[in-house]
Structures are given as C-alpha cells and as structure tokens.
C-alpha cells in the first residue's frame, strides 16, 4: 500500500499530524471523510503521484493517528483548516491544491475560503457547504442523514458506536483492501478517535454553520477554480437535485459532475476519480 510514499508524523502547534507523502511536482493535499483515515486514498494517491504531483494524504485532526482537538472550538473546520495551513507551510508548500471527500470536503472548503492566496484549486467530493445542507433539512434529509443530529447528542453516540464498531460502520478487507481496512478498524475502535469523529459533526451545528453564514452575509466566495464531484449511487442528488447549483453562488469558477460509484469513491472508483481530478488540475493554472 502506498508504494513509493513515506509515512510520517509532523508536529505543528496543536499537535501531531500523521501523513503519507509521495511523488514530486505541484502539491496536492488529500482529505478523507468519515469514518476513514488517510489510507482511503491508497489506490488514488499513487496515480496522482505518477502523473507528476507531490501528493500528501493525512489523517484529519480528530481522526486516525492525528492529534485530538483540545475543545469544541478546536474541532471546527476553521481551526482544522488553520492547522493544515500551518502543516503545509512546515512541509515547504506556500501554494497547493486540496481535495476533500465527505467530512474532509468541509475542511477543504474552509481551507480554501480562509486562505485564498494559498489554495490554488479545490475539489469537493460528496458534499455541499454545511450551511446549505442544514437549510435544506427536509424530512428526506432527516431520514437519510439522521446521524448529523444523533451525533450532536452528548456521550450517547460514542457509547453506541464503541459497543460494536464493526456493526456500526461495516466495511471489509475485500471491499476496502486489507491494509486500508486494518487502519480503519484501529481508528473506529479507539475511544478518543470516535469522540473526535463525532465532535466533527457536533461543531457543524454550531461554529461551522455560523462561519458559513458569516461568509455568505459578507458576500465572500471561493477565489480558486473549484471542482465538485459526487457519487451517482449515493444520496447527494436525491437530496439536492443538482449539487452544482448549490455550489455556484459560493464560487467564481465551477465545474463537476457525477461518478458511477457508491459513497466511498476513492475505494470504489479510484481510476475514474483519479482521471477526473487529473483533468481538472491539469486544466487550471499551475502553482509552485
């Protein structure tokens, strides 16, 4: 897994970030979703690296082997974006592109919104802005994404998940790959990580929503070219219709479409995902 990549732990102000790094060329930062770790990218990252990019896959703060935020505010996407901007500086990258899937798409969006001079291009996968999701909270949303609100309850979600993590999350080595599955299993059985993953949801209903609302009220938009991709066999289209219509007011340059995949597209459709990402990043202006 990740042949040619180095597994590292890098210290920043808030704690340690676990990451894998490989390739050479313009830097691409890949952010996973819930409940995965950076190893979800194990089939995609080598393709991107072979195509001429420096690829950095990391465990988000609160997930996997990275640090646990100290408090509720530390789990906000703004705080996580600040930590990742510092990380990229420590790795020697002033400008970079970022890809975020699922929960990682929210941190990727905040990273681009708060650092317009540093994020050269953004790809969001299987997500819309948190504020937009909450404002569209119909009965269908509540049925499909009920966990957003269950995870907001103190303590009970952690107890429910840790009672039987495998039954809660599913997954298998056959579907995910043996090493990816093992990394995922270690994460979902760690009480601190489960708390960190759930807290990532809790803060969405408070600070994250408020940050999105403040941006919209001020008329702020993403300054970089943006790609939105979603899984055809997931529920984003069922909930929202055309996700591009939701993203358009937040962007100046937007493209995207569906991928024939279930939710975990990096594991289920890695070749198609890599092809779409490479076409996008090669078409936008290069960055150092």
Image (cartoon, helix red, strand yellow):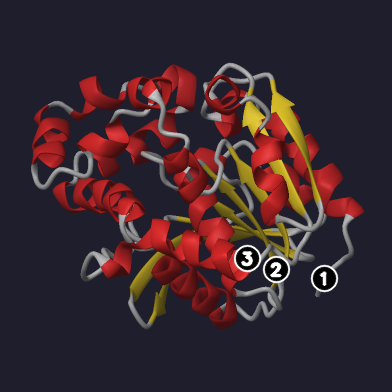
Is the C terminus in the top left, top right, bottom left or bottom right quadrant?
bottom right
Q: Is residue 97 above or below residue 126?
A: below
Residue 157, given in percent of the width and then of the height, sits at 15, 37
In the rendered image, the vertical position of residue 195 relative to residue 216, given as above or below: above
Residue 1 visible here: no
28 lies left or right of 139: right
Q: Which mark is residue 112?
A: 3
> Could you tell whether 69 is left or right of 144 in the image?
left
**SS class, disc 3:** helix
Which residue lies at the image location 30% right of the left edge and 26% below the top edge?
Answer: 169
First in sequence: mark 1 vs mark 2: 2
| Mark 3 Cα shell of 10 Å, populated few (<14), some (14-19), many (≥20) | many
Instruction: From the top left corner, tell me how far across and down residue 12 is, in percent.
Output: 41, 79
The CA distance from mark 3 to mark 2 is 10 Å
Is 81 displayed left or right of 3 in the figure?
Answer: left
**Residue assigned mark 2:** 96
Work out whether mark 1 precedes mark 3 in sequence or the reverse, and give the earlier one. Answer: 3
Ranked by sequence position, the earlier of labels 3 and 2 is 2
Can residue 53 be seen here? yes
**Mark 2 surroundings: few (<14), some (14-19) or many (≥20) residues within 10 A:** many
Residue 101 percent coordinates (x, y): 54, 43
Q: Are marks 3 and 2 in contact (CB under 8 Å)?
A: no
Q: Does the residue at mark 1 contact the one at mark 2 (Cβ under 8 Å)?
A: yes
Contact between labelled residues 3 and 1, with CB atoms less than 8 Å apart: no
Dot 2: element: strand
In-front residue for pair 105/18: 105
Q: Name the mark on residue 287.
A: 1
* The quarter of the displayed image where residue 243 is located: top right
């Amino acid at each position: 897994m990740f042949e040619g990549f180095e597994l590292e732990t890098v210290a920043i102000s808030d704690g340690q970030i676990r990451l894998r790094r490989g390739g050479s060329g313009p830097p691409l930062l890949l952010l996973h979703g819930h409940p995965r770790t950076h190893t979800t990218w194990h089939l995609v990252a080598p393709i991107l690296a072979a195509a001429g990019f420096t690829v950095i896959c990391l465990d988000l703060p609160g997930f996997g082997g990275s640090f646990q935020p100290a408090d509720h505010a530390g789990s906000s996407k703004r705080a996580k974006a600040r930590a990742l901007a510092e990380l990229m500086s420590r790795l020697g990258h002033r400008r970079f592109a970022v890809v975020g899937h699922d929960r990682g798409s929210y941190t990727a969006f905040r990273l681009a919104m708060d650092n317009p001079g540093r994020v050269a291009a953004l790809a969001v996968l299987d997500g819309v802005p948190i504020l937009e999701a909450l404002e569209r909270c119909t009965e269908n949303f509540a049925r499909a994404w009920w966990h957003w609100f269950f995870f907001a309850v103190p303590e009970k979600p952690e107890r429910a998940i840790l009672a039987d993590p495998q039954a809660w999350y599913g997954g298998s080595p056959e579907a995910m790959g043996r090493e990816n599955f093992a990394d995922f299993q270690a994460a979902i059985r760690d009480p601190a990580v489960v708390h960190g993953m759930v807290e990532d949801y809790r803060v969405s209903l408070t600070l994250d929503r408020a940050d999105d609302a403040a941006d919209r009220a001020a008329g702020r938009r993403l300054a970089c070219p943006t790609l939105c991709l979603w899984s055809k066999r997931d529920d984003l289209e069922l909930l929202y219709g055309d996700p591009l219509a939701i993203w358009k007011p937040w962007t100046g340059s937007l493209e995207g479409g569906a991928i024939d995949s279930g939710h975990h597209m990096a594991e289920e459709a890695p070749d198609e995902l890599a092809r779409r990402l490479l076409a996008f990043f090669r078409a936008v202006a290069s960055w150092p």
